[in-house]
Amino acid sequence: MLEDLTPPSRNTRCKMGRLYDSLEEKDQGILEKALASPQTWSSKALARELTNRGLSITEGPLALHRTKSCGCYRS
Ligand SMILES: [Zn+2]
């Protein structure tokens, strides 16, 4: 249950990154495609559909992750 527990200072994954990590491989692939298709999926629409499926995410962190402006891509 706590396998992923790391100290806060080392946890640089943003909310969207952690959500992504929590998905099964198959779902990660689908999500990756959606994130890479801004023409098909606006950040707002994608966040809404994920929330509808029980994945709590809002447009803000999703858009930041999508544009690699989040903690996941900071080193
Ligand atoms: Zn991220």
Image: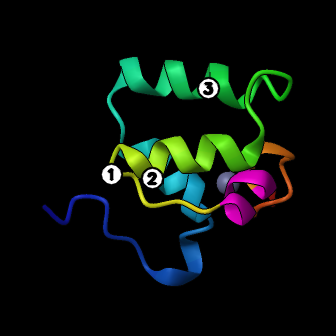
Disc 2 marks a residue whose amino acid type is Thr
The residue where tag 3 is placed is 32
Q: Which residue is mark 2?
A: 51
Q: Say whether disc 1 or disc 3 marks the residue closer to the N-terminus.
A: 3
Give residue 31's quadrant in the image.
top right
Q: 10 Å neighbourhood of mark 3: few (<14), some, or many (≥20)?
A: few
Q: Which residue is mark 1?
A: 54
How far apart, in angstroms, are the residues tagged by discs 1 and 3? 18 Å
Q: How many marks?
A: 3
Closer to the camera in the image, 69 or 56:
56
- Residue at 57% x, 51% y: name it: 17
- Answer above or below: position of 24 versus 1: above
> Residue 73: percent from the left, percent from the top?
78, 52
The amino acid on which the numbered mark 3 sits, given as a three-letter code, is Glu
What percent of the width, then of the height, locates residue 68?
A: 83, 48
SS of the residue under disc 2 = helix
